[in-house]
Image (tube, helix red, strand yellow):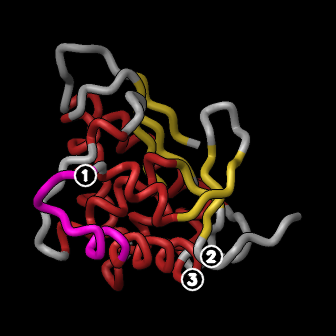
């Protein structure tokens, strides 16, 4: 395996291949050049997102969609409301491990409302497909389990059923497929 530079991530393409690229370069490409956003602010937000994925989550491979969502949240945290929807793929993907990590000490009590809010946010863009990935790791993280168990399988099934229920409850005019892996 090739060691990435500290300022780079491997960005996963739709065909499954990963391409290494500077987080700052991708951030500038995704944000474009809106007049209200200073380039230094974009650089700082990109550095924060890079640190989040590499140091906090221990990941070096991310999709451009995941990076865009995290960058948008970082910029919103800095008081800049930038719509990066144009850079997002038509099919939306979310990492369940990120949602579980944001649940804090409330674990499942905070996780499920966040999951529903994320699904609503993704449906707002009217995608043809919504993907949630990292289910197995998310379940183990929520339960604090090292190995897969019956409790893990039960929570796994509960999360999938909850997503199906929420998708049916939030039914939109255009059909939307749900993929959970």
At label 1, counting other C-alpha atoms closer than 10 Å, the crowd grade (few under 14, some 14-19, many 20 or more) is: few
The tag on residue 55 is 3
Asked which quadrant contains residue 148, the reply is bottom right
Residue 149: x, y in percent? 69, 64
The Cα atoms of the two marked residues, 3 and 1, are separated by 28 Å
- Residue 152 seen in the figure: no
Question: Which residue appears farthest toward the right when viewing the image?
Answer: 1
Element carrying mark 1: loop
**Which residues, given as a range, are shown in magenta?**
33-43
- Circles 3 and 2: CB atoms closer than 8 Å: yes
**The C terminus - image quarter:** top right
Which residue has dot 2 on it? 58
On screen, residue 14 versus residue 76, left or right, reads: right
**Above or below, 117 relative to 37:** above
The one of 27 and 150 positioned closer to us in this rendering: 27
Element carrying mark 2: loop
Which residue has dot 1 on it? 33
**Above or below, 46 relative to 154:** below
**Above or below, 91 relative to 80:** above
């Amino acid at each position: 395996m090739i060691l990435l530079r500290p300022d780079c991530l491997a960005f996963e393409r739709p065909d499954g291949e990963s391409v290494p690229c500077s987080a700052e370069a991708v951030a500038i490409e995704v944000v474009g050049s809106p007049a209200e956003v200073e380039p230094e602010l974009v650089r700082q937000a990109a550095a924060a997102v890079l640190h989040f994925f590499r140091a906090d989550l221990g990941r070096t491979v991310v999709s451009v969609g995941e990076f865009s969502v995290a960058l948008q949240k970082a910029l919103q945290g800095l008081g800049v409301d930038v719509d990066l929807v144009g850079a997002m793929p038509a099919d939306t993907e979310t990492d369940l491990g990120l949602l579980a990590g944001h649940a804090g000490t409330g674990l499942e009590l905070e996780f499920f409302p966040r999951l529903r809010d994320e699904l609503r946010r993704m449906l707002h863009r009217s995608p043809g497909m919504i993907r949630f990935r990292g289910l197995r790791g998310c379940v183990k993280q929520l339960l604090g389990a090292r190995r897969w168990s019956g409790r893990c399988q039960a929570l796994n099934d509960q999360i999938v059923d909850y997503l199906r229920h929420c998708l049916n409850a939030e039914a939109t005019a255009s059909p939307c497929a749900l993929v959970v892996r």
